[in-house]
Image: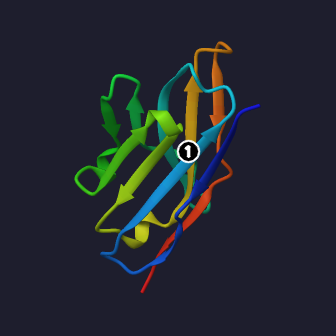
Amino acid sequence: QVQLVESGGGLVQPGGSLRLACAGSGSLFSTYVMGWYRQAPGKQRELVALIIIGGSTNYADFVKGRFTISRDNAKNTVYLQMNSLKPEDTAVYYCNFKTRVPPGGDYWGQGTQVTVSS
């Protein structure tokens, strides 16, 4: 059974930094995409960043130049380094792993709250 556990959220002042981590356990040998999404109150969940198995990355325009996604395949862990945080970055952040086995495997963490406020 696959389980994703996020950590690293919290309260930070505008301009500050946080590093999120998402550790996966279970049958994740066929993971080909790891990603971070976020959902603010009253809004839909949106993509923040993706990292593909080959190492290429994709970022939402609103985080380009501020956030960096990385991964440690040996640990089944994906990270999100968030710098220059803004109040509008306040949201619950979720990690997501997509696998080929089983076909269409799509797993989510429980979410971690990030609050940017002075």
Q: Where residue 55 sits in the image (x, y, percent)?
A: 32, 29
The residue located at (34%, 22%) in the rendering is 54
Residue in the image at 43% along x and 39% along y: 72
User: In the image, is residue 45 above or below residue 100?
Assistant: below
Q: Which residue in the rendered view is the most extreme toward the right? A: 1
Q: Residue furthest front?
A: 74
Which corner quadrant holds the N terminus? top right
Nearer-the-camera pick, 28 or 37? 28
| Residue sitting at x 41%, y 72% | 87
Q: How is the image coloured?
A: rainbow
**Count of labels shown?**
1
Q: Is 20 drawn above or below residue 70 in the view shown?
A: below
Horizontally, residue 28 falls left or right of residue 83, namely right
The residue pinned by badge 1 equals 95
Name the foreground residue: 43 vs 100: 100
Residue 22 point in image, percent of width and height: 55, 48
Residue at the outermost left position:
65
Judge whether 55 appears above or below 65 on screen: above
Amino acid on which the number 1 mark rests in the picture: Cys
Q: Secondary structure at mark 1?
A: strand
Q: In the image, is 45 to the left or to the right of 2?
A: left
Q: Is residue 114 or residue 76 the one in the foreground?
A: 76
Label 1 neighbour load within 10 Å: few <14, some 14-19, many 20+:
many
**Splitting the image into 4 quarters, where does residue 103 fall?**
top right
Return the x and y of residue 34 as percentages of the image width and height.
48, 34
What residue is rendered at 55% in x and 45% in y? 95
In the rendering, at what x and y percent does residue 33 appear?
47, 28
Quarter of the image that includes the C terminus: bottom left
